[in-house]
Amino acid sequence: MLRSRLSILALTTTLSLVGCSGGASAPESSTAGQNSSADSGAQTQAQSEAQTESSLDDPADADSADFEDEAADIVAGFSDEELAGSLIIGTWEGTDTQTPVDMVKQNHLGGVIVMGYNLSENPTKDQVTELTGQISGARTKGQPVSIGVDQEGGPVSRLGTAALPFPPLMGLAATDDSDLITDATTVQGRNLTDLGFTIDFAPDSDVTVGPKDKAINVRSGGTDHEDVAEVVADAVEGYRSGGVSSSAKHFPGHGRLGVDSHESLPVSEKSIEEMQDSDLLPFKSAVKAGVPMVMMGHIGLPDAKTTPATLNKRAYSALRETLDYDGVITTDALNMKAVPQNLKGGETVKALAAGADIALMPPDSAAAQKAIVTAMGDGTLKKKDLVEKSERVVAAQLATAEAQKSVRAGDSDAKDPQKVLTEVADKSLTVLKGECSFTGTDSISIVGGSDKEKAALKEAAEAEDLTVGSGGTSVSLSPSTSAEVAVGTAAPWTMRSTPAKSAVTAYDSNPYALRAVAKWLKGDLEASGQLPAEYDGSDKAPDCG
């Protein structure tokens, strides 16, 4: 599958994270030095005008190692409070745009993550860039502000209508095309760069087990660890070219666990050492591809069943030593239920003591910053260690800033997003039952599924000149509703029980994916997607490659 990367798999490993949970914190009450929105916007514009030139011909050439000296100089000027804050990526509730600005300024945060609940119901690009512009202008010192987002694609897409509609990683894997996967994530990376984001907490580097996988599911590239490793490496290469800092997640692997860490702590039956030739392979390939960040997952291990890996020193040591990873390690969201929520910043101290460089989404960012300062004072955390962490984080931030300047300078070379996403949708459409080519129809009737998905399929079908009404070929968007054709818009195993003679999955319900379905129904497209997952019933799928 895809171009061979087996030589990569014997090398290093990496991980990433997903800030998925709710819960937020307000900035410390001090208002000294607070910028207004207008001041922040003006500062952002001034910074943008002053930083339009890049020394890089290719954004993928940005390397944090080239910024180590500059980072060391910046961190050397930090107070203890600034040092503590530089290791936190905070979160907030609501759509107020001043709160994240105040958090960065008053608590000296290294950055914030933008969640769906921070945006309006149908956000516009201008609304998002206004928000990210104000946040990026909140810093007056040399450390850039990290602005992160969980924009994997598919079910984990926080930006809604403001960003390009992007399929989940399993949809990309189904194309069986390495270059296309890289092109697609380059397009996504450029889109996020354009929107003002510096980190995308993607790609998901977990290997799914299929129907029993409650948390990862279609977010994974599939059920085969070697295939997933190839897809992850292709995606990392694309994000590098797109200018955003990617983050492989959730180390050491969440996809084989049947418990969602948002709700409680899942425990792996295998040790990290026992995962060397399976779950760790995607992380190894991500490291080899140059992923700048790995996310530690909230996963219990056989020798630490009640302690999430995010607070487990041995897990961080395995990532550093076993996988030879020297980049930034972030925790998964510390406001998830797999982590104790009553520690008043103690969870952040524990994570940093265990080996994290970034505490992502602590329940209270201000309390977390104070707890770090206190821990430095009483010796729980050594300042020397925190300086090393901060230097690593700042060097990565500087490298991303340089990559994004290169992206903006080279927009004329960018591939057409619509063409790339159309090709992804066409090549990923996968037949689950029946023939690779549909006989073709001029009219369809849509049954089953949600009203929203039925309306979206109707729009896509009419755009391909299909008549949609009460006659013609019956098409169901639900496995429990009888029809001639079943169309899945999620993981392929969701259509296992369909009685339809023909069934396809588009992995998503975005407009490009549904247009591909419409073209197939009309007889204008032969579905060539390769099923990335094995599960009970997957043997019914024909080989359409």
Image: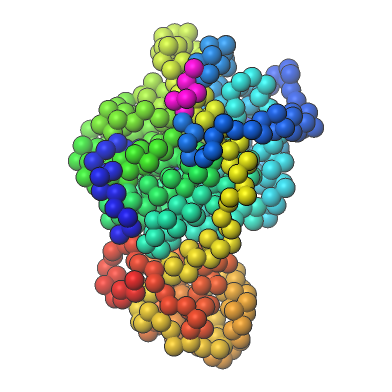
Q: Depth check: give the residue in front, 321 or 28.
A: 321
Specify the quadrant of the image occupied by residue 236: top left
Instruction: Identify which residue is drawn at 60% across, 27% down.
Output: 144
- Could you say where residue 366 lies in the image, as x and y percent from the top left? 58, 24
- Quarter that holds the C terminus: bottom left
Specify the quadrant of the image occupied by residue 211: bottom left
Instruction: Examine the rendered structure and indicate whether residue 375 appears above or below residue 396.
Output: above
The answer to whether one can see residue 414 in this image is yes
Instruction: Identify which residue is drawn at 28% across, 64% down.
Output: 534
- Could you say where residue 276 lies in the image, as x and y percent from the top left? 22, 41
Q: Tell me, yes or no, whether the highlighted magenta stretch contains residue 390.
A: no
- Could you say where residue 51 lies in the image, as x and y percent from the top left? 66, 30
- Quarter that holds the N terminus: bottom left
Instruction: Examine the rendered structure and indicate whether residue 214 appears above or below residue 8.
Output: below
174 with respect to 147 (left or right): left
* Residue found farthest to the right: 38
Instruction: Examine the rendered structure and indicate whether residue 93 appears above or below residue 105.
Output: below
Instruction: Identify which residue is drawn at 46% across, 15% down.
Output: 387
**Total number of numbered labels?**
0
Q: Depth check: give the residue in front, 303 or 271.
A: 271
Give the overall secondary structure of the magenta segment.
helix
Specify the quadrant of the image occupied by residue 306: top left
Q: Which residues are magenta?
A: 64-69
The answer to whether one can see residue 366 in this image is no
435 with respect to 358 (left or right): left
- Could you say where residue 377 lies in the image, as x and y percent from the top left? 47, 8
Q: Depth check: give the residue in front, 159 or 47.
A: 47
Instruction: Examine the rendered structure and indicate whether residue 423 appears above or below residue 137.
Output: below
Instruction: Identify which residue is drawn at 61% across, 20% down.
Output: 142
* Residue found farthest to the left: 274
- How is the rendered protein coloured? rainbow
